[in-house]
Image (cartoon, rainbow, N blue to C red):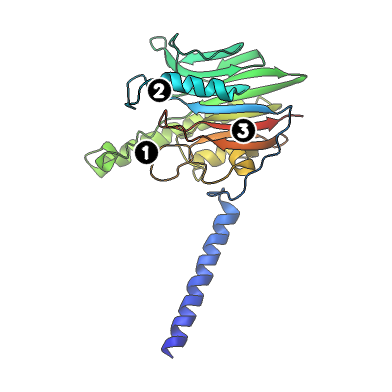
Amino acid sequence: MFLIYWVVKLKKQFIISGVVLLIGWLFFPAFLKFSEKNTARNNDVKVMSYNVRMFNLYKWIKEEDIDKKIVEFINTKSPDILAIQEYHSSKKKKINYPYSYFVPKSKKNNFGLAIFSKFKIINKGSLDFKHSANNAIYVDVLKNKDTVRIYNLHLQSLKINPKKENFGEKSSEKLIERLKTGFIKQASQVEAFLQHEKQWNGKKVICGDFNNTSFSWVYRQISKNKKDAFDEAGIGFGKSFNYFFPMRIDFILTDKKTQINNFKTYSKKYSDHFPIMSRINFE
């Protein structure tokens, strides 16, 4: 009887575990991809998104010449479209593209969001998020006969420091209040972006640091009716933030009609984020 009891109990646990896994598989985005898609074509557009953390301006990483290594990495990969968060406009940063758009955090600052393009930029703008150092910008680029909108998003940071006790707060109440404030700002920024996005019916790519994961409300709202380059063509965990747990908070999304042929996350520890790049085909 004892043996039968444990067999039945194990069966129940197996069934419950199976149901939980099935629900996760059906209703949540992929956490781990086991196969990589690589159907690259000659007319693909290489799109990179990278939070460069101001090129290590304040020496968070003790390694020498981080700024030069970031620039060298970008120039070696040579993306056709490059979306950078926490870009610093120092003249030392030699990222050479025929077309670019940079919006600083404020008139007093020389860091912010930037988009670089090998294709002609025919329109550009900024969403100018209120009461935040974060922002979203966009450009319209001309690719043959197509006009493609490129968004670069950097949503509100939750300001969590995993290296400090209670994530940098002395009490859990202060931590909860800080997270609450961050989530409210993120929600407001997402709504502003979605309202702006509705005005564009053409082909588009959304790049950026969402400061939230693929399991979040933020991601679900922005990715609705879009393709996620990692889901379509990535492999592994897609970890994009340098943390002990595989957090994916940087994204490249496209409209449903666009073909995604490849996606890579590069393990370059030149920032607290890892660069991501996708090969996209609009034809």
- Compared to residue 28, the image places residue 107 above or below, namely above
Residue depth check, mark 3 versus mark 1: number of the one nearer the observer: 3
Mark 3, residues whose alpha carbon is within 10 Å: few (<14), some, or many (≥20)?
many
Left or right of 50: which side holds 225? right
Residue type for callout 3: Ser
Left or right of 231: which side holds 66? left
Task: Identify the residue shown where x is 43% and y is 11%.
Answer: 90
Which quadrant is the N terminus positioned in? Answer: bottom left
- Can you give x and y, in whole percent of width and height, for residue 144 in the image? 76, 19
* Label 3 – label 1 distance at C-alpha: 33 Å
Read off the residue under disc 1: 180
Residue 83 numbered mark, or none: none
- Can you give x and y, in whole percent of width and height, for residue 13 in the image? 48, 72
Of label 3 and label 2, which has the lower sequence position? 2
Residue type for callout 2: Ile
Task: Identify the residue shown where x is 65% and y is 32%.
Answer: 279
Mark 2, residues whose alpha carbon is within 10 Å: few (<14), some, or many (≥20)?
some
Read off the residue under disc 2: 66
Read off the residue under disc 3: 278
Residue 129 at least partly seen = no
